[in-house]
Image (tube, helix red, strand yellow):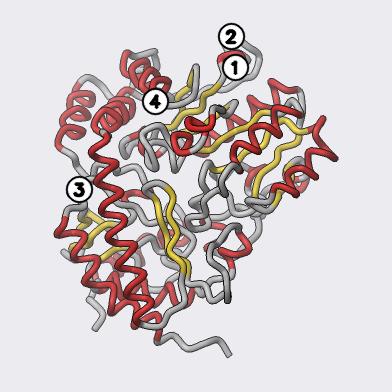
Amino acid sequence: MPVPTPASAALFERARQVTPGGVNSPVRAFNAVGGTPRFITRASGPYLYDVDGQEYVDLICSWGPMILGHAHPEVVAAVSGAVARGTSYGTPTPAEVDLATALVERAPVEQVRLVSSGTEATMSAIRLARGFTGRDLVVKFAGCYHGHVDSLLASAGSGLATFAVPGTPGVPADFTAHTLVLPYNDRDAVAAAFAEHGDRIACLITEAAPGNMGMVAPEPGFNRFLSETCAAHGALFVSDEVMTGFRTHAHGRWGLDGELEGWRPDLLTFGKVMGGGFPAAAFGGRADVMAALAPTGSVYQAGTLSGNPVAATAGLTTLRLATDEVYAHLHRAGEAIRAGVGEALSAAGVPHLVQTDGTMFSVFFTEADGVDAVRDFAGASAQRTDRFAAFFHSMLEQGVHLPPSAFEVWFLSAAHDDAAVDRVLTALPAAARAAAAVPDPS
């Protein structure tokens, strides 16, 4: 029986009167799965608590940032101290220097500029690439989401995929005319695009491992191929690690390929984990490229809250606590849940694929015969989202909160202990049966 949620329903009705769709980010509205979104009042460790008093194992983790779990005591203490010293100064601060230093130490960047959101980071990186190269064209991949930047919303994944729209009104055609959209994992398409437009391409941007169409890993050597192709044509290679940065690996997704293969992106973008749950992000890369930014160069970028001392403190503390033991735990807990998902769906006779990269994973309710992997947006889009919706609601009723979209990654934290994992595993068989009960489309 459905768990009653009258307080969430009442809040949702109030919210729809004052906020478009009742939410401040579209996927939260549950449009893709139906039903009433849960309004959360607090979170602790691996759990969320809603206004109706229900407890949920959280597999969203604020869409990635909460790698340590919610309300980690050391992060809370550090943030409380920062707040007591003032919330924003509008001046340089020691905390922002410390956070920038930590990013340079962990990631393949020589300099970074702090901003307030992943969207701002990718927008700024694209502007910098165009200013540095003197070129206009940007290459991206269908299904890769880089924030709601005008020129990058063409064939984006994530929320746009959830709502089954290719782009959005409000973005002039002239903007997206400067964007070339290619199929992911398709080397021939990349080679052809650069052969025809190479001297006009400012940069190629890609998620280091796409997590906005579900978890679709780059095929072996693909990112290296992109880096080498850009270098051969004088374009910049921009690796978007807003989601994967310090989530899939201590050195970002680059730690799983570039660090081993001996190449570096020209620019990278970061967010999520490096903000520790606060609005903080960054872009960085080669020192000569970053030197083109004002005040040393002529490419302008600025932000009132960039390097905010509270956010920088939260991010720095989170990175300090994201130790090798944390990543090992994420791997163990993730493997247990992935195996449980596969066993439950197979037992219920539900066609599916479970895909992982580093510590990130997702489930595709795909029925494609003979397909052993989803490798691009077309494959991700072919799944049975109706079955996911039934699976989602069964898990939610049993106290497990998944991302409310089939096109999103599941996230774990260091706080997901055996008890939390067992609750997820216990809920899976019934959820799999709910997915199996969805009739085939007529």
Query: Label 2 belongs to which residue?
Result: 296
Find disc 1 in the rendering and name its residue: 293
Q: CA distance from mark 1 to mark 2?
A: 6 Å
Label 4: which residue?
Answer: 106
- Marks 3 and 2, Cα distance to the nearest angstrom? 43 Å
Badge 4 or badge 2: first in the primary sequence: 4
Give the CA separation, mark 1 to mark 3: 39 Å
Is residue 357 visible in the rendered structure shown here?
yes
Q: Where the N terminus falls, by quadrant?
A: bottom left
Real-space Cα distance between discs 4 and 2? 25 Å
Residue farthest to the right, as pictured: 196
In the picture, the disc for residue 415 is: 3
Question: What kind of element bears circle 2?
Answer: loop
**Which is closer to the viewer, label 1 or label 3?**
3
340 is higher (above) or lower (below) than 173:
below
Query: Between marks 4 and 1, how big is the CA–CA gap?
Result: 22 Å
Residues at circles 1 and 2 in contact by the CB criterion of under 8 Å = yes
Q: Quadrant of the C terminus?
A: bottom right
Q: Quadrant of residue 312?
A: top left
Q: Position of residue 22 (x, y in %)?
A: 41, 60
